[in-house]
Image: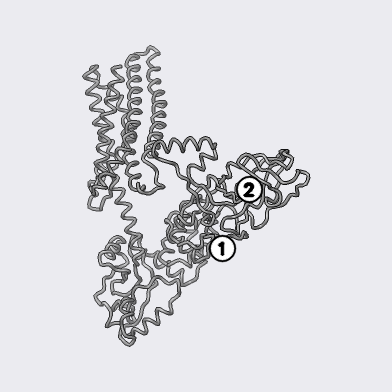
Amino acid sequence: MIYLSQMLGNPVLDANGEKIGVVNDLGIATGEVFPRVTSLAFQGPGKTPFMISWRKWVDSFDDESVRLKVPATDIRFSYLQPEEVLIARDLLNKQIVDTRGMRVVRVNDLKLSDTSSSQLRLLGAEVGMRGLLRSLHPALERVCCRVGRTLGHPIPEKIIAWNYMSLLDRDLSNVKLAVSHKTLDELHPADIADIIEQLDPRLRGQVFAQLDDAQAAEAMAELDDDQAAEIMGDMNERDAASMLQEMDPDDAAELVGELDYEKAEKLLKLMGVKEERAIRQLLGYRENTAGRIMTSEFVSLPPDATVADGIERVRELDEDFETVHYLYLVDDDRTLKGVASLRALVVAEPADRLLDLSETDVICATPDDDQEDVAEDISKYNLLAMPVVDDNRRMLGIVTVDDALDVLEEEHAEDLQIAGGTTGLGEDDENRHVLWHLLTHEMWVFFWFAGAAILAAVTNAMAGDAGIGLLAAAALPVCLRASSNMVQYAIAFFIEVDEDDEDAPSVAGFALRGLGSALVFALLTVLVLTLFGGALEGLGSFGSVGADVLRMAGESVRQGFVASAVTIVAAFAAAPGVLQLLRHRDEADKTTNGLSLHLVALVGAVVVFVAVYVLLYLA
């Protein structure tokens, strides 16, 4: 096995052993499961680029040089063929899509297999840390791997095979890929959306270019609203309107609602009349209501319809029709009379009346009902869809279970914020809003007051001057906020990272990132606020009235910020302990309150700050 990084820059020698250039790229024939290297690109004298056929002219190779079969004078140069790709130019350090893992990765190196003394094949892309270390220097990779094994954390290779790679940075529409090569348009729309969210913005359009309108519309519906609106805003208006037309009305209305008014109006006018009317009707309802998430596409039949009529109606539906779970029986005024499930259709006789098989005491929502209430009712009653009716029980649309899940997911995200020490307020809590917000969002303010009081008492006891302690307390908010951020950092890591995932960051990496950030922040704190303290001391050096007081104030402020810097580092040094506590309690099936963690962190920050300040003061 050999890697591209080991070949780049190696000398190219002719049959006489004379150096005629250095390797700067390899060309592969893409129409194979493991593509053969078909071309050698090298840089000759005067940095002139050359390309030759690998099969015709290369005699042998290793990780030190490439040797040719003939003298330099006998070489005939060639050009890159339409089915070829230059792997250093088109793959190395580029973003690709791993269509097996459904993720976006960056290629750090490329692994090659020597099938003979002169034949090379591309096995796949190295996307892990080893490829990055190797590209810096092979010796660095060896040292880091040895250290990792010694510490019990070996650094594995992470290879993505060629047939699972989808290239993005270059238009490969004319390149013939292997039959087994899995491309983006074969993935599920939800997987495509996940990939798009991971991509650089400049590459997102290239993903949509590989999809037809229906696939693009389904993927767009799976994206976050803000991101979908951003992509839609950058698209050609006619293409954007076509995509909206392919989307379900509720998804399209939600997306149009995120666009600016002028853009939204242009797109709506470019759509078909039927689709435009459906979207405008949904946009007429208030945000966060059932009306905004319902779809107007549902299967309705008259109350006297038979099972055979229902089956025939379902057969006539378009393939892209909203998923059908129920048949809704409505009269000429569209008043809901009953709901029949597809299961009832399957087990009944063709001549049976649907109304006799239907549930007539139907649980419904109104368009002004809160989305969360509707979603919770769908979950409570195990429904796949809930009809939305007006005050006269006339059918307006349905809210499907997938839309309800989206609403519950958003509610869950809010619950996670509460777990991190924050919460929301209802309308009945308006009188307590300010106090509650301070308690849950800005607890450090109260600890600042408490810390200032403690410092004032300590300095008054030591020097008879409480004012010195109050000046030092100016540095407290910095470390208090940092301590609170540390808890949030640990909670976020605990929620987002599965420790059983082999690709998950280690606790050591988590600790190093936290400490690195803390050290940088602490250093900036010391530098900036030392200048502030020095300025106060400088004012006292002019011999003005109160010079001693100013010098003492400056020294106190400076000591306070040094104590703050030490506290910041100490707080983030405790982050792995907080993470382990969360994991231990989770394994024991115990609930950990985020607010309590913040309180403990802030108490600890005040204690450390006061202790360090007193030590500095006495020194």
* SS at circle 1: loop
Badge 2 amino acid: Ser
Residue 324 in percent (x, y) is at 37, 73
Which one is in front in this view, the residue at disc 1 or the one at disc 2? 2
Q: Is residue 279 visible?
A: yes
Badge 1 amino acid: Val
Comparing 503 with 377, the one in front is: 503
Q: Residues within 10 Å of mark 2 (few under 14, many from 20)?
A: few
Above or below, 329 relative to 401: below
Residue 361 in percent (x, y) is at 24, 75
Rounded to the nearest angstrom, the CA distance separating label 1 from label 2 is: 28 Å
Q: Residue at x 31, y 83 (%)?
A: 348
For disc 1, the marked residue is 179
Q: Residue at x 30, y 78 (%)?
A: 344
For disc 2, the marked residue is 117
In the picture provided, is 569 more to the left or to the right than 276?
left
> For the C terminus, which image quadrant?
top left
Q: Residue at x 43, y 72 (%)?
A: 321
Residue 32 in percent (x, y) is at 59, 58
Q: Earlier in the sequence, mark 1 or mark 2?
A: 2
